[in-house]
Amino acid sequence: MVNLNASIIVALLLFGIGTLGFLIRRNAIVVFMSVELMLNAVNLLLVTFSRMRVDLDGQVMAFFVMAVAAAEAAVGLAIIIAVFRKLRSIDLDKASLLRS
Amino acid sequence: MISFLFYVFSALALASAVMVVTRKNPVSSALFLVMTFFCLAGIYVLMDAFFLAVVQVAVYAGAIMVLFLFVIMMLNLSPDELPAFMNRRIKWAAAALAIVLTGSLLFLDLSRRLPASPAGELKGEVGALGDLIFGKFLLPFELTAVLLLMAIVAAVIMARREI
């Protein structure tokens, strides 16, 4: 039997690592991967709560999160390619066209 | 046995998540991310969420990671033009922020008592989930189809024109 409280803690730590990566990296692709980590942490939490409540609704919710994550990955990577074409770089510090 | 496997998968998932964030080369970040996804799929199997485990491997480790690796290799950046980390001051502030956030979430979690073991059995099999998706959650499911179509159109427009 899986210890569900431990699973919640794993999900929270995974979310924290994702947040950290989102904040400290400058490479747009790795920032994007950090977002995926955070989405996965939320999925793990949803599955855990679904198991805890003996109710499949949480797993359906996690399924929808995966579908939205797939759409988000496609659009996000297209944006990264467009930014790269414009700036010849994927450094997020250089993407400051709106600042001036 | 299941409990032992759960701890192994959790430790591997957390360790490779840390590697994703700390590696300078995006290709190794991507491969460690695959490792994290597989470990999470293993945890889903241990929690009897079989369908989600399969979808996790197929969609995340299969489709999304191929997309990431494809973009990394298409951009083909040389190692010296790879941006790595924010400057030191932002880095420490961000680390402090992330630690405070995680710590407060952990505190919230530990300060309430949730049942450690559920009251009954729950099998996340294809049939049971399909009944829910095509019954109770039919409208969100159809909206997801529209969302995916919008994502395809947006990605194509974004990738072919100069913006």
Image (cartoon, coloured by chain):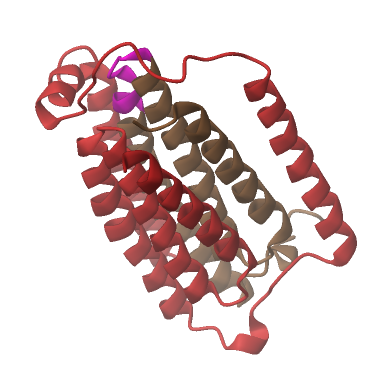
Chain colours: A brown, B red
Q: Which residue is painted at 68% across and 18% down in the image?
A: B111
The stretch in magenta equals: A53-61
Q: Is residue A93 left or right of residue B15?
A: right
Pick out the residue farthest to the left: B127
| Res B107 quadrant in image | top right
Q: Is residue A66 magenta?
A: no
- Where residue B47 appears, as percent x and y from the top left, is 31, 33
> Looking at the image, is A7 positioned above or below residue B110?
below
- The quadrant of the picture occupied by the N terminus of chain A is top left
Q: Which residue is painted at 53% across and 40% down in the image?
A: A10
| Res A46 quadrant in image | top left
Q: Which residue is painted at 59% across and 59% down in the image?
A: B18
- The one nearer the camera, B25 or B7, is B7
Pick out the residue farthest to the front: B1
- The one nearer the camera, B75 or B86, is B86
- The one nearer the camera, B64 or B17, is B17
Q: Is residue A97 visible?
A: no
Please give the count of numbered marks on the rendered protein. 0
Q: Which residue is painted at 48% across and 75% down in the image?
A: B27
Q: Is residue A83 left or right of residue A48?
A: right
- Where residue B148 appears, as percent x and y from the top left, is 30, 41
- Where residue A49 appears, as percent x and y from the top left, is 42, 22
> Looking at the image, is B21 positioned above or below residue B134?
below
- The one nearer the camera, A24 or A26, is A24
- Where residue A90 appears, as percent x and y from the top left, is 61, 70
Q: Is residue A46 left or right of residue B114?
A: left
| Res B84 quadrant in image | bottom right
